[in-house]
Image (cartoon, rainbow, N blue to C red):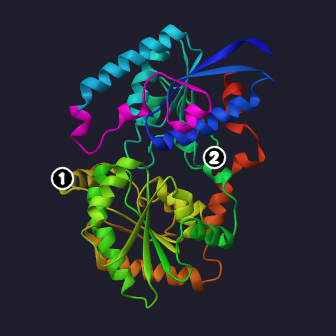
């Protein structure tokens, strides 16, 4: 075993990245003692800190919402960028891992690469959806790209960049198959009535998303409830206290339907639900892995949507559909995302999930593809060490 610890700089700017970073650091920690010791310093959330991260700044400092907020916070972010570069330089890190959070991490990676630091970027940018020319540019300052989805390495085939498909740690952590027992246990845990229909509503964690989607999602839930004789309970998992406080204020405008909020209970909320109304994004993958039927929706402001039409080049917006290459979950976007259309889609999808044999077959196939790490312990960390011969 090498007596000198390998110093790894690592940065996640969002909670989704913290989940990935925590799992990756746990991989390294499991290897520790067999090959060499590891030290981690940088930015992350609770999972990365629990795995041994020495924090150089709070992940909350990266929290921005909407279009103007990044510009308002630009001086603060620029100061943080310079501080972290100095901290990494002073610590003499051997390797840097940027986890998603592309704009900020790419800036850090470019500077560190010039200093001769080995660079890993974890999570491919959405080159399949827009600005495909980025694939070649990334190869100029990233040595190894760790891809979550099987179709992504192909976009880097003609570049100098080594792109490796490593699967998704969430898929490895969640058991494939029926979840009836998990549903009953989760309803008991959340004190939900067993005889009710439970609709999970996922409007996002960013305040801008909540304001954009909450009203139409709850109006859809009310319309959905009128299609059934059994009571409907709406459950909403809140990513943090700020999101919960915001939703608590907004839900007061809808006294006609029961809405329950839960913090730090994301998995239990999904398992307890019969069906999910979710924004486009990583939450669609969570629904798939928890084996829950879903309807996917999203709305942008008129100005943002006008420009998005010209730069986004993808047939689908939800990960289940993108991965499968076909529509396995319904998507209702922008002007199509009305309370009437969403409620009808929810009713259709719930009926199909309960009546159609093999409804979850595509869900389970994708789950198996993404769970490649479940049979290969410490797979992602091993790929990093093997690539750099460390």
**What mark, if any, has residue 169 been given in the picture?**
2
Q: Which residue is drawn at 65% across and 82% down?
A: 357
Count residues near mark 1 (Cα–Cα under 10 Å), then give few for <14, some for 14-19, many for 20+.
few
Residue 235 screen position, x and y as percent:
44, 67
Q: Give the range drawn in magenta.
A: 44-72
Give left or right: position of 282 versus 32. left
| Mark number displayed over residue 200 | none
- Is 321 situated left or right of 257 in this image? right
Q: Mark 1 points at which residue?
A: 303
Residue at 25% x, 28% y is: 74
Looking at the rendering, in which quadrant would you find the N terminus? top right
Instruction: Relative to 147, say whether 224 is above or below.
Output: below
Q: Nearer the viewer, residue 317 or 217?
A: 217
Q: Is mark 2 on a helix, strand or loop?
A: helix
Magenta region includes residue 62: yes
Q: Where is residue 100 in the image (x, y as percent from the top left)?
A: 47, 37
Q: Does the magenta stretch include residue 19?
A: no
SS class, disc 1: helix
Q: Residue furthest bottom?
A: 229
Q: Where is residue 333 in the image (x, y as percent from the top left)?
A: 33, 65
**Which of these two is toward me, 315 or 332?**
332
Q: Which residue is drawn at 53% across and 78% down?
A: 193
């Amino acid at each position: 075993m090498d007596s000198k610890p390998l110093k790894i700089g690592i940065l996640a700017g969002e909670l989704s990245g913290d989940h990935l970073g925590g799992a990756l650091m746990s991989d390294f920690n499991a290897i520790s003692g067999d090959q060499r010791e590891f030290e981690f310093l940088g930015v992350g959330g609770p999972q990365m800190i629990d795995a041994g991260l020495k924090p150089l700044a709070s992940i909350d400092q990266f929290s921005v919402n909407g279009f103007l907020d990044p510009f308002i916070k630009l001086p603060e972010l620029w100061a943080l960028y310079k501080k972290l570069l100095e901290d990494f330089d002073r610590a003499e890190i051997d390797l840097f891992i940027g986890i998603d959070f592309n704009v900020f991490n790419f800036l850090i990676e470019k500077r560190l690469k010039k200093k001769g630091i080995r660079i890993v970027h974890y999570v491919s940018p959405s080159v399949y959806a827009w600005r495909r020319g980025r694939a070649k540019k990334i190869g100029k300052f990233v040595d190894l790209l760790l891809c979550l989805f099987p179709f992504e390495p192909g976009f880097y085939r003609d570049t100098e960049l080594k792109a490796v498909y490593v699967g998704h740690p969430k898929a490895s952590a969640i058991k494939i198959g029926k979840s009836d027992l998990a549903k009953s246990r989760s309803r008991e845990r959340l004190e939900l009535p067993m005889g009710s229909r439970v609709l999970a509503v996922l409007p996002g964690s960013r305040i801008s998303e909540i304001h954009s989607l909450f009203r139409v999602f709850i109006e859809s839930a009310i319309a959905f409830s009128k299609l059934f004789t059994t009571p409907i309970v709406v459950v909403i998992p809140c990513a943090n206290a700020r999101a919960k406080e915001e939703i608590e204020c907004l839900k007061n405008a809808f006294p006609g339907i029961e809405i329950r909020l839960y913090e730090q209970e994301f998995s239990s909320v999904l398992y307890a639900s019969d069906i999910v109304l979710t924004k486009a994004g990583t939450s669609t993958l969570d629904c798939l892995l928890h084996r829950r039927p879903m309807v996917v929706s999203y709305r942008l402001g008129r100005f943002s949507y006008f420009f998005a039409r010209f730069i986004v080049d993808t047939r689908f917006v939800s990960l289940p559909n993108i991965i499968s290459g076909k529509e396995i979950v319904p998507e209702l976007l922008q002007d199509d995302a009305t309370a009437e259309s969403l409620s009808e889609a929810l009713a259709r999808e719930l009926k199909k999930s309960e009546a159609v044999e093999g409804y979850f077959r595509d869900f389970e196939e994708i789950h198996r593809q993404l769970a490649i790490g479940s049979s290969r312990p410490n797979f992602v960390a091993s790929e990093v060490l093997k690539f750099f011969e460390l």
